[in-house]
Image (cartoon, coloured by chain):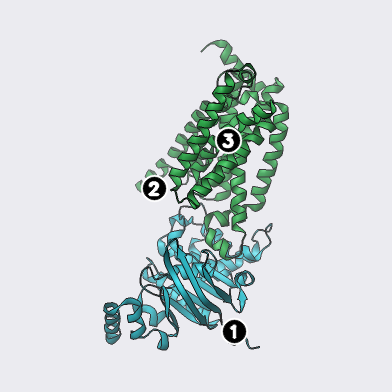
């Protein structure tokens, strides 16, 4: 480690570089978004669905670039979302119609979509236009590439997502905790579940910029898993998850800004792992140290 | 028109298939209002399936179900359903009061949160099932019987006309069993109709006044004296259990 790296890490927090500000804000929003969507997925016992959806998005990103020649975020997001939803439909069909077990169907969809994406990506990298597209950055994330325009779009999306989660929280609690009771009582349980699936797709296709496709599962699942050690309430669980996602995102954005060539994803996961370890030990609701102190008393 | 003449539940020719196997075949019965009915039958007889098919969770191959003379969609608000304990994730981050408040959500528009009035109802219901001391506890910290009583309280705040329970007595302690039985009677005496999937033949006489006997087809339905007879038990369970039940009755 040399003095310049140290300095540039610190310089980030002075935020006199406006770019550092976008990157920081963007990474925080992306971290929070994925953590909240992932929190619901954990509670719905479909934690790995998000991972599959992320992998399924890759071919869509590459094809969107091939068709439009544009690297603009909305274009790539559109491709990612389309491909991810296609993966979701394939998964649904395999489990419901073809009666394939959930985990086998997940593995089949996740790997084949991802493999197709890698094939397209490798082919694209071989021609000069594609080499500059930087799509390979999506594999492990690159927060430093966030621009002000990206941030504007992201802020709108985050506002819509957090607003509806806050508004609908009692109903979401209901349909996730006891879907049969909600259905019997006339709640549109299927619509709420579709909404949560949509939220998951949104979190996954945007979160790629931060953590990348390969390590997406960590950003979706670790914040909620860590938050569970601290609280037994859904509202605080989601809030804490969002906070953990933001902290990990912000720290990783710091590294990414100082070392723009280094992928951000692994750093996000390292910081999340630290948060998880601390929660596992010290969590107020069910941390290990708390449990042993209880036995002692 | 007299309300008492319209059955609380009216099922006609209800058939359900799981893939290739037949789960229910041509089930039909009328259950009058103010009945306290047990759905009885051997394992795999389709007891839970009957409840789920009536509520539209499982598509029926054929058949019609009406509640108080209306189709399901029009009657949902009148129905309180309590699922099997095994279908619930008891590790979910939710406390006792929040769980009971779920019973009021169907009565509020989707943007409204439960307020003071709902809270009052929930606390009263928790008191009625002897759980008022557990209001703030996370449900994961409760015993199986306590969890079942919380669900009972949730059903109470729904203020329904028809209560449908899926095996409420499964794996609960004696206190809870008594609490459930008492709430059943209270609901019936207040004018509601209660239907419960039930496993224990020895307590049918004590807890219920009607029986629906099932073995993929309907065996019998009616007041206990007509439907819960040694002959119909034998048809549902085969000879051995009917003899056992006869013995138990003889001793009691």
Residue A214 can be seen in this image: no
State the mark number for residue B6: 1
User: Which chain can be seen in cyan?
Assistant: B
Most foreground residue, B6 or B195: B6
Between label 3 and label 1, give the one nearer the viewer.
3
Q: Is residue A112 left or right of residue A124?
A: left
Between label 2 and label 1, give the one nearer the viewer.
1
State the mark number for residue B213: none
Subunit that carries the residue with mark 3: A
Q: Which mark is first along the chain, 2 or 3? A: 3
C-alpha span from label 3 to label 1: 55 Å
Q: Is residue A264 left or right of residue A280?
A: right
Q: Looking at the picture, does residue A8 appear above or below residue B94?
A: above
Q: Looking at the picture, does residue A174 appear above or below residue B251?
A: above
Q: Which residue is mark 2?
A: A294
Residue A155, position in %: x, y? 70, 36
Q: Residue at x 52, y 33 (%)?
A: A114
Helix, strand or loop for disc 2:
helix
C-alpha span from label 2 to label 1: 57 Å
Residue A131, position in %: x, y? 61, 18
Subunit that carries the residue with mark 1: B
User: Which chain can be seen in green?
Assistant: A
Helix, strand or loop for disc 1:
loop
Most foreground residue, A256 or B211: B211
Marks 2/1 in contact by CB < 8 Å: the verdict is no
Q: Which residue is mark 3?
A: A57
């Amino acid at each position: 480690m040399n003095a310049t790296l140290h300095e540039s890490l610190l310089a980030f927090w002075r935020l006199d570089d406006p770019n550092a500000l976008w990157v920081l804000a963007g990474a925080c929003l992306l971290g929070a978004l994925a953590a909240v969507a992932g929190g619901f997925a954990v509670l719905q016992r479909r934690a790995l669905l998000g991972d599959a959806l992320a992998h399924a998005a890759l071919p869509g990103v590459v094809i969107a670039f091939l068709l439009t020649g544009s690297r603009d975020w909305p274009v790539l997001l559109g491709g990612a979302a389309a491909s991810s939803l296609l993966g979701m439909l394939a998964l649904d069909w395999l489990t419901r119609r073809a009666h394939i077990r959930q985990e086998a169907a997940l593995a089949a969809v996740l790997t084949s979509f991802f493999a197709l994406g890698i094939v397209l990506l490798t082919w694209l990298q071989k021609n000069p236009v594609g080499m500059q597209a930087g799509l390979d950055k999506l594999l492990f994330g690159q927060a430093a590439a966030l621009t002000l325009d990206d941030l504007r779009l992201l802020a709108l999306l985050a506002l819509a997502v957090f607003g509806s989660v806050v508004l609908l929280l009692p109903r979401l609690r209901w349909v996730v905790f006891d879907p049969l009771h909600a259905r019997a009582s006339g709640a549109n349980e299927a619509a709420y579940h579709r909404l949560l699936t949509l939220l998951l797709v949104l979190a996954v296709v945007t979160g790629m910029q931060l953590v990348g496709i390969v390590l997406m599962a960590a950003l979706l699942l670790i914040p909620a898993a860590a938050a569970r050690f601290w609280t037994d309430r859904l509202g605080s669980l989601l809030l804490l998850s969002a906070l953990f996602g933001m902290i990990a995102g912000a720290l990783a954005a710091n590294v990414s800004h100082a070392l723009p060539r280094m992928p951000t994803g692994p750093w996000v996961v390292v910081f999340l792992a630290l948060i998880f370890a601390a929660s596992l030990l010290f969590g107020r609701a069910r941390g290990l140290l708390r449990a042993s102190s209880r036995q002692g008393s | 028109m007299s309300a008492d003449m319209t059955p609380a539940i009216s099922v006609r020719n209800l058939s359900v298939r799981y893939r290739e196997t037949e789960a229910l075949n041509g089930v039909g019965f009328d259950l009058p209002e103010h009945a306290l009915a047990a759905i009885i039958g051997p394992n795999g007889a389709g007891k839970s399936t009957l409840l789920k098919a009536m509520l539209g969770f499982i598509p029926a191959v054929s058949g019609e179900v009406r509640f108080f003379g209306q189709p399901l969609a029009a009657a949902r608000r009148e129905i309180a359903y309590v699922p099997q304990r095994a279908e619930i994730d008891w590790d979910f981050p939710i406390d006792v009061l929040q769980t009971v408040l779920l019973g009021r959500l169907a009565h509020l528009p989707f943007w409204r949160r439960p307020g003071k009035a709902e809270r009052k109802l929930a606390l009263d219901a928790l008191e009625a099932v002897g759980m008022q001391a557990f209001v703030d506890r996370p449900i994961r910290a409760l015993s199986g019987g306590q969890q079942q009583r919380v669900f009972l309280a949730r059903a109470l705040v729904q203020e329904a006309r028809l209560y449908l329970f899926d095996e409420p007595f499964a794996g609960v302690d004696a206190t809870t069993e008594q609490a459930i039985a008492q709430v059943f009677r209270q609901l019936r005496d207040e004018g509601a109709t209660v239907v419960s999937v039930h496993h224990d033949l020895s307590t049918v006489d004590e807890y219920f006044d009607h029986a629906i006997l099932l073995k993929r087809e309907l065996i019998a339905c009616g007041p206990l004296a007509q439907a819960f007879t040694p002959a119909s038990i034998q048809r549902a369970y085969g000879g051995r259990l009917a003899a056992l039940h006869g013995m138990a009755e003889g001793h009691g």
